[in-house]
Image: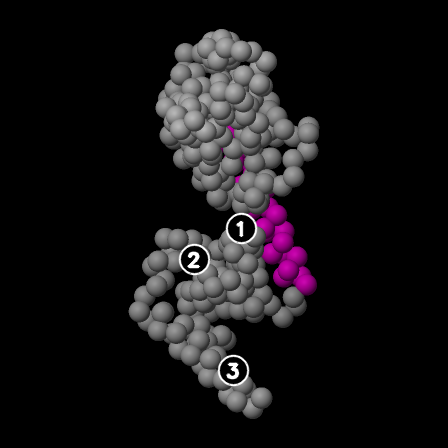
Amino acid sequence: MAKEIKEEERTLELDLNRITLVEGLAYPDTFKEYKNMAVVLSQIKDWYLSEEEVLGIYGLDNIQKILEQYPHIVKTNAHWKNEKGTFDIKYVDIASVYNIKPSDPYYDIFFARKIRQLDLLELDAFLDYHTEHYYNNNLQDFSRFLRICIRKHTTTFLNTETIQTINEWIEAKEKQQSVLQRTSEKQIGKERKNKVTRASEDKKTCLSLEQTVLLIHYLQQERVFLNDEYLNDTEMGTAFEILTGYSPNTIRINLGDSHLQKNKSKINLTKVDKILSRLQIAVGNDLKGK
């Protein structure tokens, strides 16, 4: 969910109103394609206007004049039944003030079109803003989206200079995150004088690394822990490094989808199941005494 938007940050949003106006003025050759996409979004959002409403907004008495003068007002093929039992045409305004979100249809296309509207000097602030407001500072998820977006829209909306600037931003942020993580790990190490060093099959905890990761996954899936909207894999790795002694980076990697599926072997699943059964018995025994 997006946070409350300050007025000075509105230029950094995927504001449908601003994107539409710039597309119409700066990219007339591709505006028809954009217009069709924006109409579909408006219809999915059910932003329909009646002819009477459109006439009232623009203070004119001829709908055709409005359609000619204001290309962002579009006549659709949809109808609704009026009081007379006949059907009125529905219209949409594809320049409505609305901030497009990752869950909206065509999000990546609106995102790529917005980027091409920006000056290169504005890109860093734009990417910083979206990392914080729409990706909860999860650089891994956002950088993955950006790389796919680049791959998908290189020949349509994104030029070489823009792509280079985005890649430089990703590289700088990943380095910054890596430094912060190492600093955090060192600080935790200093604060924890008796930090545990793990070795294979050392039996210091009853679950292996892979089995521990599976337990984390299922507990998070059942909302015992915060989900990844509030707690990313890096933070989860740091937390469980303190609890188990396993490397936070290794935990983070194993929480990834591809590694997680590999960890779901019959042996690992059986071990986790037995631990949960033992916990259930222990709780049940205490419950009998109440």
Q: Quadrant of the C terminus?
A: bottom right
Q: Report the residue marked by disc 2.
A: 254
Q: Nearer the viewer, residue 82 or 155?
A: 82
Element at label 1: loop
Q: Nearer the viewer, residue 39 or 76?
A: 76
- Local crowd at mark 3 within 10 Å, few (<14), some, or many (≥20)? few
User: Which of the two discs, 3 and 1, labels the residue nearer the N terminus?
Assistant: 1
User: Which of the two discs, 2 and 1, labels the residue nearer the N terminus?
Assistant: 1
Q: Which residues are magenta?
A: 166-191
Separation of disc 2 and disc 1 at Cα? 18 Å
Considering every residue shown, the one lying at the far front of the view is 84
* Badge 1 amino acid: Glu
In the image, residue 283 lies at what x, y percent? Answer: 51, 82
Q: Quadrant of the N terminus?
A: top right
- Local crowd at mark 1 within 10 Å, few (<14), some, or many (≥20)? few
* Badge 3 amino acid: Val
In the image, residue 44 lies at what x, y percent? Answer: 43, 34
Determine the residue positioned at 60% across, 29% down.
12
Q: Report the residue marked by disc 3.
A: 283
Evaluate whether residue 107 shows in this view: no
The rendered magenta stretch, by its main secondary structure, is classed as: helix
Q: Report the residue marked by disc 1.
A: 229
